[in-house]
Image: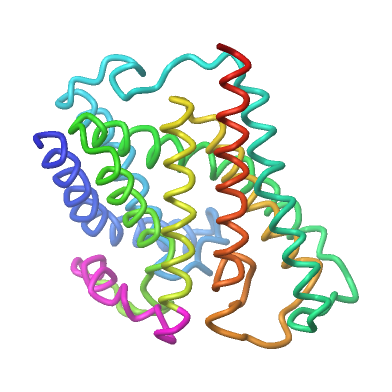
Amino acid sequence: MKDVIKLAAYFIATVVIGGILAPVLFWSAQSLAARGVFSFLAKYDFETFFHRALLVAAVLLLWPLLRISRVRCLADLDIAPNSRWGRDLCEGVVLSVIPLLFCGVLLVALHVYAFRHSFAWPRFGKMLVASITVPFIEEAFFRGIALGLLLRTGRKYMAIFAVSVIFAAVHFLKAPERTSEIVTWTSGFSSIAHAFGGTGDPMMLASALTTLFFIGWILADARVLTHSLWLSIGLHAGWIFGSGTFSLLARHRITALPWVGRNLLVGIIPLGVAAVTWVIMRIWVKYDRALQA
C-alpha cells in the first residue's frame, strides 16, 4: 500500500511542478525568439510548453521515486533478463501491425475509408521516429516503473487496471489549444482545469478511452506474462506504426461511431482487432515459453 501512496504522490508532484515550470519555459522561449535565437519557438502556444514541462517534471522526480521505493535493480520491479528480447520485440510488432492493417483494408472495402492520392513522406519520417522512441519511453514508465511498483502490492489485476486507466487518460485528455492566451504564473493550473475541454463528443471520448484502456491492459498483460518489456514495446510500436501508416495511406470518409472513429485505434471494430491481437499474443507466449521449458 505504501508504494501506491508513493506513486500517487509522484503523479501529484509532477502535475504541480509541471504547472509551475510551464510559464517559465514559455517566457524563456518567447524571450529567446524575440532576440532572434531559436525564433521557431515563437510559433508554439503555451499548451505545448505545458506538456513539455510535465515531461521534465516527471523525469526530474523519477530518481527520488525510485530511491524512496527502494528500487535498486530491475528485479525489484519484477523484470527479469530476457535472452529472447529480439524475438519478443519482432513478434510484438507483427502481432499488432498485421491485424490492424487487415482491419484498415476491410474498412476501405466498406467505404468507411478511401485511399489518398498521394503519400506524405515527411510525415512518414516523423511517424517512424515516434514508432521507435515513444514505445521505449512509455513502456519503461507505465509498464516498467508504475506497474512494477503496483505489482508489489500483490494485487496483479488491480495494478494492471490502475496503470491502464492512467495510460488511457494521459493519452487522450489535453487542454484545447490557445487555452491560455495571456500567460501568468497560474496558466499551468488553468490548463489542468481545462483538460476535459478537449474531449469533444462524448461518444468519441468513450470510444477512445475504452480502446486505449484495453490496449493498455494488453500491454500490461504482455509485460506480466514475460516478466520483460520487450514484447509490450513491440506491440506498442506496431500499433503506432500501423495506425500512423494507414492514416497516411487513407482518409476517413465517415465517422461511424461507436464502430470506428477518426483512426484505427478508436471504436468497437478496432477494439475487436485489439482483442484478436491479445488472444494470439497469449497463445504465442504460452507456446513459446513451453518450448523453452
Q: Which residue is drawn at 47% across and 74% down?
A: 207
Residues 43 and 2: in front is: 2
86 shown above or below 36: above
**Residue at the image point whose x is 72% and y is 67% from the top:** 247
Is 249 placed above or below 196 here? above
Q: Residue drawn at (20%, 32%), measured in percent from left and top? A: 154
Measuring from the top left, give residue 131's x and y in whole percent. 64, 46
Q: Quadrant of the N terminus?
A: top left
- In this rendering, would 203 be left or right of 279? left
Horizontally, residue 109 falls left or right of residue 97, namely: right
Looking at the rendered image, the quarter that the C terminus falls into is: top right
In terms of depth relative to the viewer, which is nearer, 71 or 44? 71
Q: Is 100 or 253 nearer to us in this picture?
A: 100
Residue 209 found in image quarter: bottom left
Task: Tally the marks.
Answer: 0
User: What type of secondary structure mainly makes up the magenta span?
Assistant: helix
Spot occupied by residue 281 in the image (x, y as percentages of width and height): 59, 40
Q: Give the range drawn in magenta.
A: 185-204
- Residue at position x 67%, y 60% in the image: 243
Point out residue 91 in the picture as x, y percentages from the top left corner. Answer: 68, 34
Query: Would you say residue 250 sits in the magenta stretch?
Result: no
Q: Where is residue 120 in the image (x, y as percent from the top left)?
A: 81, 65
State the scheme by which the image is colored: rainbow
**Is 218 or 149 nearer to us in this picture?**
218
Question: Magenta stretch containing residue 189, yes or no?
Answer: yes
Query: Taking 44 as reference, is 190 left or right?
Result: left
Q: In which image quadrant can residue 67 be found?
A: top left
Looking at this view, name the residue that lies furthest to the right: 117
Above-or-below relation of 195 to 112? above
